[in-house]
Amino acid sequence: LGDLEIRNAKGTLTEEDISSDLCLNLFALIITNMKRALKIERLAEALWPGDVMDNPYRSVSNIAYRLRRILSIIDLEDLIIGRHGTFVINPEYNVYTDFDRFEDNCRRMEAEANPKAQSELYQGAVELYRGDLFSKISYQHWLMPKTAYYHNIFLRIIKCYIERKMEQGAYCAAHRAVVDAMSLDPYDSELNTDMILIMYHRGGAELAKSFLQTAKAYISEEQIESAQQLWERT
């Protein structure tokens, strides 16, 4: 998530070390599909979309060889291996990824009832979500659905956290979470509605009315009416 870092006991590799987008693309393909082996044809299609390959195995193998040379800087040249017409992560390695940890944090937070544990899991998820998956190559057609998947998980978990904090009357924590979410999706109608409610509870009707004027372009008539009922009832 965000800029790539590969860490082990021998050091750290970054996107600057993997200067070739083809090498980075191959690594991203394999690491995001650790639970299933990708056939050579699938890898070639993703690396060279639309091209007809005379020898896809040789083409992919050449990129894999270049990638292994880069990984050898931190003694990980055997991290990626060829097996039965596929390239996979070497099963002898224990590989931990931030996107798997992020997804696990989000699942646990949704199921957690303890307010303190909720906050800790939420903060862990926010720290792990540093931007688009493999941001340098996020334009790749095969990667876009995965990037959208993690983006949507992040928005969902923030909305879940906001709802929990508002139920608990923890409007300061909810406010910080809305700000986090709106930095990613400032036009989301639910987030804008939540911000109006939070401003009403934290700063009063006038502050909420002021934000409503800005948010009207992004929220429905029903949401506008619901917000207005807050101060009309008082």
Image (cartoon, rainbow, N blue to C red):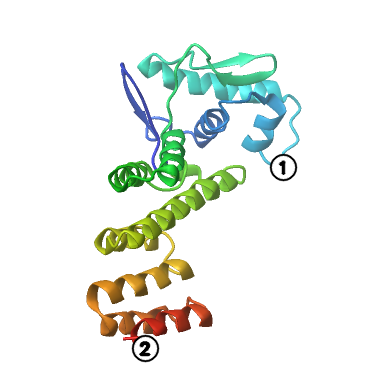
- Residue 188 shows in the view: no
- Left or right of 54: which side holds 228? left
Say if 88 sits above or below 126 in the image.
above
Q: Nearer the viewer, mark 1 or mark 2?
A: 2
Badge 1: residue crowd in 10 Å (few <14, some 14–19, many ≥20)? few
Specify the amino acid type for callout 1: Gly
In percent of width and height, residue 128 lies at 36, 41
Q: Choose between 134 and 187: the one closer to the eye.
A: 187
- Residue 146 shows in the view: yes
In percent of width and height, residue 113 lies at 38, 46
Give the CA separation, mark 1 to mark 2. 59 Å
User: Residue 48 appears in which quarter of the rendering?
Assistant: top right
Q: Is mark 1 on a helix, strand or loop?
A: loop
Q: Choose between 181 and 57: the one closer to the eye.
A: 181
- Left or right of 24: which side holds 16? left
Labelled disc at residue 1: none
Labelled disc at residue 232: 2
Say if 21 sits above or below 154 in the image.
above
Badge 2: residue crowd in 10 Å (few <14, some 14–19, many ≥20)? few
In percent of width and height, residue 87 lies at 61, 20
Q: Choose between 156 and 86: the one closer to the eye.
A: 156
Q: Is mark 2 on a helix, strand or loop?
A: helix
User: Residue 173 appears in which quarter of the rendering?
Assistant: bottom left
- Left or right of 24: which side holds 50? right
Q: Which residue is at a point 31% across and 17% down the rendered structure image? A: 9
Q: Which residue is at a point 52% across and 80% down the rendered structure image? A: 222
Specify the amino acid type for callout 2: Glu
Residue with the mark numbered 1 = 50
